[in-house]
Structure formats: structure tokens, C-alpha cells
Amino acid sequence: MSSRWIPSGASWSTVPLPFTMSELSVAVQHSLTIPIILWNNRGYGEIKRLMEERGDQPYASDLRTPDFVTLATAFGAQSEVVREPVALVEAVGRAFEADGPTLIEIPDWT
């Protein structure tokens, strides 16, 4: 087994994140330094965009989503919201310096 550390992270969209809370709990329990980047489009944003492009009225694509920052904090992870691309780079850098996982939420910029 190699002792070499390779930086890695995770990226999720709004819908699958609630299904992976157990992984967040494990990352906290084992103090895994990992940035978790959440693109929060509050539902099925890509599907909604495709419906609109086709001229269809979007349906079943906007979801009620939790406050992911509060949820991550409740699990014991660090968390923050970034609103600008440059802030994302800085947040990922801080996440790699943390003593456990960090959820970085990106509100839909479009």
C-alpha cells in the first residue's frame, strides 16, 4: 500500500446529495480531508433547462431542498456557500487544509 497522498474531492448536484448523507457521516467520523462541491440548482436543473429549450412547460423539476450548509454542519463537517468562481477556488484550497470534510455549496449561477 502506498503512503502517497493524492488530493481528491467529490461533486454532487442537488438531488443525489441527500442520498449520500451516510458517506458524509463516515468522512466526518474518519476526519477525511475532502472538499464536497454541491451545485445547488434546487432540483433537476438540467432536465428543466432541456424542457424549456424544447418549448415544453417544465414540470416536476423544481424541488424543495434542505439547507445543505446547516445539514453538513449538523453532521460535524465544515461548510460554506460560494457565490463567485474565484471564491470557489479559495474555498477548495481551505477545504484541503481542513481536518475533515468540507461541503462547498454553489447556488445556481445561471
Image (cartoon, grey):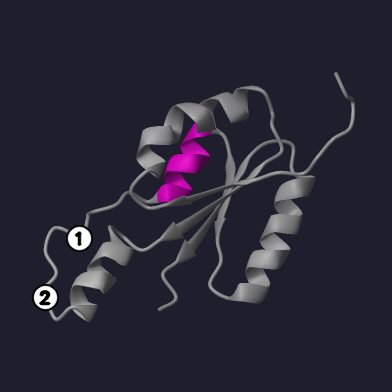
Q: Residue 97, percent across and down? A: 79, 47
Q: Which residue is mark 2?
A: 56
Residue appearing at x 31%, y 60% in the figure: 42
Q: Nearer the viewer, residue 38 or 28?
A: 38
Q: Look at the image and say whether residue 93 sits in the magenta stretch.
A: no
Q: Residue 34, percent across and down? A: 67, 41
Looking at the rendered structure, the secondary structure element under dot 1 is: loop
Q: Look at the image and say whether residue 69 sits in the magenta stretch.
A: yes
Residue type (three-letter) at the residue carrying disc 2: Asp
Q: Which residue is mark 1?
A: 61
Quarter occupied by residue 61: bottom left
Residue type (three-letter) at the residue carrying disc 1: Ser
Image quarter of the N terminus: top right
Marks 1 and 2 sit apart, C-alpha to C-alpha, by 12 Å
State the mark number for residue 28. Answer: none
Residue appearing at x 21%, y 61% in the figure: 62
Crowd rating for badge 2 (residues with CA inside 10 Å; few <14, some 14–19, many 20+): few
Q: Is residue 5 left or right of residue 43?
A: right
Looking at the rendered structure, the secondary structure element under dot 2 is: loop
Residue at the right extreme of this rendering: 3
Q: Is residue 47 left or right of residue 6?
A: left
Vertical placement of residue 12 versus 86, above or below: above
Q: Nearer the viewer, residue 52 or 75?
A: 52
Crowd rating for badge 1 (residues with CA inside 10 Å; few <14, some 14–19, many 20+): some
Residue appearing at x 43%, y 41% in the figure: 71
Vertical placement of residue 106 versus 66, above or below: below
Q: Residue 110, percent across and down? A: 40, 79
Q: Which residues are magenta?
A: 68-75
Q: Nearer the viewer, residue 42 or 5?
A: 5
Quarter occupied by residue 16: top left
Quarter occupied by residue 46: bottom left
Main secondary structure of the magenta stretch = helix
